[in-house]
């Protein structure tokens, strides 16, 4: 089992910045990828950014150039630096970790609210 705990959400004005962090504990050695997803009211959960164990990164087109994902393997943490935030990015942001052995499995954090509003 893997436990994920997010922190860093809150209220920010349009154009502002926030940094989300996610601490992982448990069977960390089984994790091959970590990342962030978000879900706005009435919409499906969508990928924001992911980072593999090798450091490879993938971003949603809508956040490229503004968001940066990073991983600290020594601390078992993944972070998401979000700049130039937009009101439409208001959502609950979820930390995700993926295990592929013995089978694919997604672990999720409890989510942290990000509100972009003036």
Image (cartoon, helix red, strand yellow):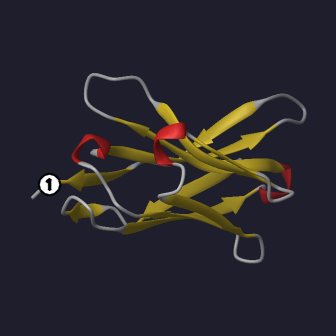
Return the residue nearer the eye: 13 or 103: 13
Q: Position of residue 72 (x, y in %)?
A: 71, 72
Q: Position of residue 15 (x, y in %)?
A: 26, 62
Left or right: residue 101 compared with residue 64: right
Dividing the picture into quadrants, the one containing residue 25 is bottom right
Residue corresponding to mark 1: 117
Return the residue nearer the eye: 4 or 65: 65
Q: Measured along the vertical axis of the image, is residue 68 above or below residue 32?
A: below
**Residue at x 45%, y 29% (from the top left corner):** 45
| Element carrying mark 1 | loop
In the picture, the quarter occupied by the C terminus is bottom left
Tag 1: Cα neighbours inside 10 Å, few (<14), some, or many (≥20)? some
**Residue at x 33%, y 23% (from the top left corner):** 43
Q: Position of residue 6 (x, y in %)?
A: 47, 60
Left or right: residue 55 compared with residue 102: left
Q: Position of residue 11 (x, y in %)?
A: 20, 62
Dividing the picture into quadrants, the one containing residue 41 is top left
Dividing the picture into quadrants, the one containing residue 14 is bottom left
Q: Measured along the vertical axis of the image, is residue 81 above or below residue 107?
A: below
């Amino acid at each position: 089992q893997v436990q994920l705990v997010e922190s860093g959400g809150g209220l920010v004005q349009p154009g502002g910045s926030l940094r989300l962090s996610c601490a992982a504990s448990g069977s960390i050695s089984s994790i091959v990828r970590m990342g962030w997803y978000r879900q706005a009211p009435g919409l499906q959960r969508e990928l924001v950014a992911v980072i593999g164990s090798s450091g490879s990164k993938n971003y949603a087109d809508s956040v490229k150039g503004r968001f940066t994902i990073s991983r600290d393997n020594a601390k078992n943490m993944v972070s998401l630096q979000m700049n130039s935030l937009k009101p439409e990015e208001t959502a609950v942001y979820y930390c995700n970790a993926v295990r592929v052995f013995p089978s694919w499995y997604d672990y999720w954090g409890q989510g942290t609210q990000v509100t972009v509003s003036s």
